[in-house]
Image: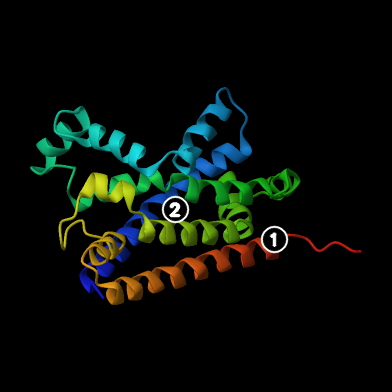
């Protein structure tokens, strides 16, 4: 077991969730409650990482974060280090390729809240902010937990984008998915199997949690 790679993967997943959950709540609530021009285009753009090959997404992010790009140059001038082949670059890339896993479950949760419930809260004297904290957020909590579970599990298992952006630097960008690949290349199937089993268990637990919460939100129907 490569404990350093596991620790780095967990840290990357936690940072990604910490950034994406509040950002995802803002985006998903906006998409759920408002109708505006190009909404379909924005939803398609958010969902693009779901269907785009990881190497393709990783390539474009590598170009966008490189030293020749405005983003890469701005980051280097501010921090003195490059965005590619760094943990910071992995975090930014992870936020981008996990955006649909965070936004879509929360958007569906906000959409399931009846608009009349919000109107009743406003009539009762609650402000929009109070309605969000006391009505919308508790009712959408299963979607938020699902978003956290999916984002965390997907970050732990991501390989293509992580390898393209971060490379394979031990202690800096070498995640557990890359460590599994290295162990297979070295014919160390025992270590590869142990780490793969760990990721399998975490992934199954996350998916089980998502489906359990989705089942609780689904109303029971009579025969």
| Quarter placement of the C terminus | bottom right
Determine crowd level at label 1: few under 14, some 14-19, many 20+ residues with C-alpha closer than 10 A. Answer: some
User: Quarter-wise, where is residue 141 in the image?
Assistant: bottom right
Left or right of 6? Residue 207 is right
Residue at point 89%, 64% (across, down) = 222
Of the pair 117 and 204, the residue shown nearer to us? 204
Give residue 77's position: percent from left, percent from top: 10, 36
Residue at point 36%, 47% (across, down) = 95
Determine crowd level at label 2: few under 14, some 14-19, many 20+ residues with C-alpha closer than 10 A. Answer: many
Residue at point 21%, 49% (across, down) = 166
Separation of marks 2 and 1 at Cα, in angstroms: 20 Å
Left or right of 177? Residue 122 is right
Residue lying at the far top of the rendered structure? 37
Left or right of 111? Residue 40 is left
Left or right of 58? Residue 28 is right
For mark 2, what is the residue? Answer: 21
Q: Secondary structure at mark 1?
A: helix
Residue at point 75%, 45% (across, down) = 116
151, above or below 45, in the image: below
Q: Secondary structure at mark 2?
A: helix
Please tell me the numbered disc located at residue 177.
none
Please tell me the numbered disc located at residue 217.
1
Give residue 183's position: percent from left, percent from top: 24, 67
């Amino acid at each position: 077991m490569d404990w350093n790679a596991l620790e780095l993967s967990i840290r990357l997943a936690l940072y990604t969730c910490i950034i994406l959950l509040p950002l995802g709540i803002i985006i998903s609530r906006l998409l759920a409650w408002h109708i505006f021009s190009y909404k379909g285009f924005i939803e398609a753009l958010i969902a693009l990482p779901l269907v785009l090959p990881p190497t393709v997404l990783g390539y474009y992010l590598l170009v966008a974060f490189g030293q020749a790009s405005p983003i890469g140059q701005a980051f280097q001038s501010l921090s003195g280090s490059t965005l590619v082949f760094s943990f910071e670059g992995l975090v930014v890339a992870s936020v981008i390729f996990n955006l649909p896993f965070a936004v879509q479950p929360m958007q569906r949760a906000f959409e399931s809240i009846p608009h009349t419930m919000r109107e009743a809260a406003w009539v009762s004297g609650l402000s929009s902010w109070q309605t969000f904290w006391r009505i919308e957020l508790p009712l959408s909590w299963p979607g938020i937990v699902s978003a956290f579970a999916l984002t965390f599990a997907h970050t732990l298992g991501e390989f293509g984008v992580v390898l393209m952006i971060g490379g394979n630097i031990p202690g800096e960008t070498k995640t557990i998915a890359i460590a599994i690949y290295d162990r297979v290349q070295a014919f160390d199937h025992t270590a590869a199997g142990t780490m793969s089993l760990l990721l399998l268990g975490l992934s199954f637990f996350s998916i089980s949690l998502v489906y359990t919460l989705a089942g609780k939100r689904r109303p029971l129907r009579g025969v």
